[in-house]
Image: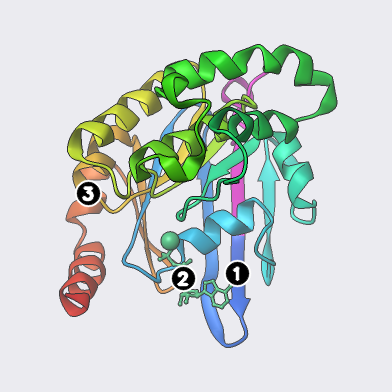
Amino acid sequence: MTSTDSGVPLLELTDIAVHFGGVKAVDGVSIRLDEGRIYGIMGANGSGKSTLLGAVTRLNPLTRGQMMFDGVEFTRLRPHRVAHLGVARTFQTVRLIDDRTVRDNVQLGVDTVTRAHRHELTTSVDEVMERVGITAVQRMRPSELSYGMQRRVEIARAIVGQPRLLLLDEPTAGMNTAERDEVSDLMRALQSEGLTQLLVEHDVQMMVDVCDYLFGMNQGELIAQGEPEAVVADDAVRESYLGKAAHDA
Ligand SMILES: Nc1ncnc2c1ncn2[C@@H]1O[C@H](COP(=O)(O)OP(=O)(O)O)[C@@H](O)[C@H]1O
Ligand SMILES: [Mg+2]
């Protein structure tokens, strides 16, 4: 039975906090994601988006809160066990191993999933590389590629393990508009296969185009959520986002 059938959210976060000393990077966030939808988190730099994704993958220590995946609590699981549950992510800064080929880097995504599934997944490394558009560069090293291509390799590594939830942290940073549209198309294609996605992205247009539902964050807290058009137009979101952007500029 899928979560959609049972009404159980795929991901449910309750009162999540991640404090780094005195810095309340995330402070009391509760969200639920239903299976098969694409969600987005908007917020100025420093609002806690990446830290929240890091809390879900258990790479950031939790100060408080509870996390459930498809009805199973994973608040205290080790990061590799969270990956086994079916949670995968890409990082805001590219994290690829440079003394290995592109293909090897994608293969590493297979190694994060449970041993029992590995055999069927190795056959899909080629398919995933084809799909993401990196087949031609599979023998190259990541550093020989453009930034946009490196990001594709990261996405390939994240999806090759066939996760149920994909967290994407600014996957189109450094990409041009055409490349960005390709990522949007890929996300929709993955959605049509049932993959739930949570996207952090600064491009407001892409957020509205690709997401079914948006969250707005500011200073570690949720300040809005709902239909994308409504969240983008929300006064508090506009003030935090545009005010900070104007300040940074
Ligand atoms: N490992 C860390 N140690 C200390 N402070 C951190 C750490 N990671 C993030 N922060 C701080 O937490 C806040 C939120 O950061 P981050 O989650 O990266 O925001 P965003 O992704 O929304 O730009 C920032 O003030 C940042 O400096
Ligand atoms: Mg970030």
Q: Which mark is residue 220?
A: 2
Q: Is residue 222 magenta?
A: no
Mark 2 sits near ligand 1, with its Cβ under 8 Å away? yes
Quadrant position of the N terminus in the picture: top right
Q: Which mark is residue 17?
A: 1
Q: Above or below — where is 185 with respect to 130?
A: below
Q: From the viewer's perspective, is 40 left or right of 140?
A: left
Mark 1 sits near ligand 1, with its Cβ under 8 Å away? no
Q: Are marks 2 and 1 in contact (CB under 8 Å)?
A: yes
Q: Residue at x 54, y 54 (%)?
A: 53
Magenta extent? 1-14
Residue 160, by quadrant, is top right
Give the residue number, with chain letter if any, for mark 3: 204
Q: Name the amino acid, label 2.
A: Gly
- Give x and y (percent) for residue 134: 43, 25
Q: Name the amino acid, label 3.
A: Val
